[in-house]
Amino acid sequence: MLIRRHDAARDDKEWRDFLLAHDFGQLIASGKGRDVPVVVPTHFVYDGDRTIRLHLAGPNPIWDALAASPHVLLSVIDAYTYIPTGWNANAGMPVEHGIPTSYYAAVQAIGRAAVIDDPEGVAAILRTQLAHFQPEGGHAEVRADAAPYASSLSGIRGIVIDINEVRAKFKFGGNKAPAHRRRIAELLERRHGPRDLLAREHLLRREP
């Protein structure tokens, strides 16, 4: 994706915090010799450093792609919203001459995927995911050698991604004057659309 200087992550902490706060994305595997890559919407758990863990069903089409090439990209997008022409017009410009744009946060984690098939390894990933998504408990102990999960583990496979590159973009008017950004922040709050307040939070957070 195109990342201009004013949209780039300021440091590793910015994209890491974003991934820690978001646990659903699209896992993309290009494999080899395919017309299009395999794209799988999925939950995942990021460890805050360089590792992502998840599991998928055995019949998932991604396994053939991973067998051909272990290189994957996990794409996560949020806080996306439309900025109308009038909002984005520069000071002194007729509002109808403004250029519309989109605000959004996007992180693409690129790495090598290791497929986990041994029951204990899959169980460990499932335990990690349950601890993250269901910290209140309420589920049976996940063991590879005991009911109720042991008989189901053969139907899923784990994936551990070792991140080696991250492309991060936080597109929230970073090239605009402070007064312009503050005005858009007010308009986002007033409009209060589905992701407007999230976009406003990023916009204000990234004020110089």
Image (cartoon, rainbow, N blue to C red):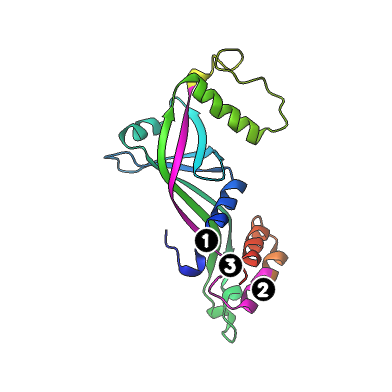
Q: Earlier in the sequence, mark 3 or mark 2?
A: 3
Q: Position of residue 35 (x, y in %)?
A: 30, 43
Residue 33, image x and y in percent? 26, 40
Residue corresponding to mark 2: 182
- Viewer-side residue, 205 vs 185: 205
Q: Amino acid at mark 3?
A: Ile
Give the residue displayed 67% in from the left and 32% down from the top: 134
Q: Nearer the viewer, mark 3 or mark 2?
A: 2
- State the residue position of label 3: 83
The answer to whether marks 3 and 2 mark residues whose Cβ atoms lie closer than 8 Å is no
85 over 121 or under it: above or below: below
Figure quadrant of residue 115: top left
Give the residue at x 57% y 45%.
48
Q: N-terminal of the two: label 3 or label 1?
A: 1
Count residues near mark 2 (Cα–Cα under 10 Å), then give few for <14, some for 14-19, many for 20+. Answer: some
In front of the other: label 2 or label 1? 1
At numbered mark 2, what does the secondary structure look like: helix, strand or loop? helix
